[in-house]
Image (cartoon, helix red, strand yellow):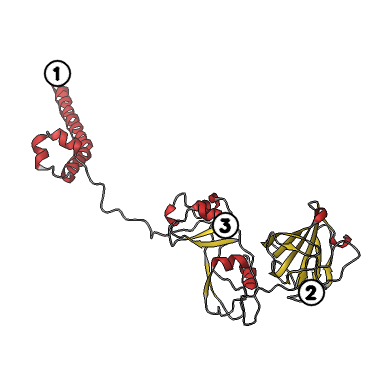
Amino acid sequence: MFAKSLRAFGSVALRYRAHIFVDVAVASMVLTLPLSLRTEQRAANAPEPPAQVAALATDAELVRASTVSRGGTITPGGNPATRVADDVKPIQRYMLGAKDTLQSLGNYYGVSAEAIAVSNGISDPSLRNQQGREIMIPPGEGVLYTVAEGDTVESVATKFKVDPKVIMDYNRLYFEPEHFAPAQLVFVPGASLPTLVYQTDDEEPTVIARPPSVNNPRPNGRLAWPVGGYISQYFWAFHSGVDLAAPYGTGIGASGAGTVVSTGWVAVGGLSVRIKHEGGFETGYYHMGAVYVAPGQKVERGQIIGTVGMTGITTGPHVHWELKLNGAFVNPLSH
């Protein structure tokens, strides 16, 4: 009975051991199937080696040295576009109308009349016979300049009295030097601009209108009134001068003899003139409609230096009259 039981146990153990071997074999085949399929796929996609290479290299070397393409043609994700930097403003174009003036255009676009005139080669500020002409509006206070043969950044900078770095920075010439080439348009920020010269309306437009000196009414003091009008705002802590209202186009006289130290456009004040006098005095005239003098010019007391206008930020035609004594603002009416 013992021998019979032993034979029965051995038969069962043998049967289950066979099942274990079968299960292990099946599991091994399942685990190795993806690896074998991946190897076959790589072999199928691999390019055929050239005949010369096949003759000189072993199979192992070919597998190691062969280059496999990663895909088809590379395409961009979107349409290419050029983006202008935030600190670079576009150059606007404007068609001149019958009633346009350089002063009105300057006020509208926030640049000086001189900047528009020089950028477009305009010599007559009245814009006579210019209706229908398309002009360029500079993107800021400065000049639009077309590069000529033989020009260098340094020569253009010297011409307009600016640092060459200003031209390089604004026009991005460090990265795109090809923009400074003949016939290319560049912008020169802060360029020194000539004062506009207004001409007569007679048959000889080349005659410069230089109004004669007049005897303006004077207070009992050192300075002469720049214009015959009324005071619309006095000197106080937040107003550095006296506003004298007068009809548009009225002549503005120098408050005293001296030398013109600056003319041109300034922020808020618009078209302006500053004159240095003896004794540490310096007078300033702002919101002018026209200027008849240039820096370095000697003027006499009462000489007409420009006209009343509305350039800059203003609510009506007037001249903002300032006085500095040794560099500090003082009340003009006290002198």
Which percent across, then down, holds residue 220?
91, 65
Depicted 109 relative to depicted 54: above or below: below
Looking at the rendered structure, the secondary structure element under dot 2 is: loop
Q: Which residue was labeled with disc 1?
A: 1
Instruction: Name the residue: 39% across, 59% down.
Output: 80
Q: Quadrant of the N terminus?
A: top left
Alpha carbon distance from label 1 to label 3: 124 Å
- Does label 3 or label 2 sit earlier along the sequence? 3
Three-letter code for the amino acid on which mark 1 is drawn: Met
Three-letter code for the amino acid on which mark 2 is drawn: Ala
Looking at the rendered structure, the secondary structure element under dot 3 is: helix
Q: Which residue was labeled with disc 3?
A: 160
Three-letter code for the amino acid on which mark 3 is drawn: Phe
Q: Is residue 33 visible?
A: yes
Q: Is residue 269 visible?
A: no
> In the figure, residue 23 lies in which quadrant?
top left
- Does label 1 or label 3 sit earlier along the sequence? 1
Instruction: Name the residue: 8% across, 37% down.
Output: 55
27 left or right of 80 in image: left
Q: Residues within 10 Å of mark 2 (few under 14, many from 20)?
A: many
Depicted 82 relative to depicted 44: above or below: below
Instruction: Name the residue: 89% across, 66% down.
Output: 219
Q: Which mark is residue 246?
A: 2
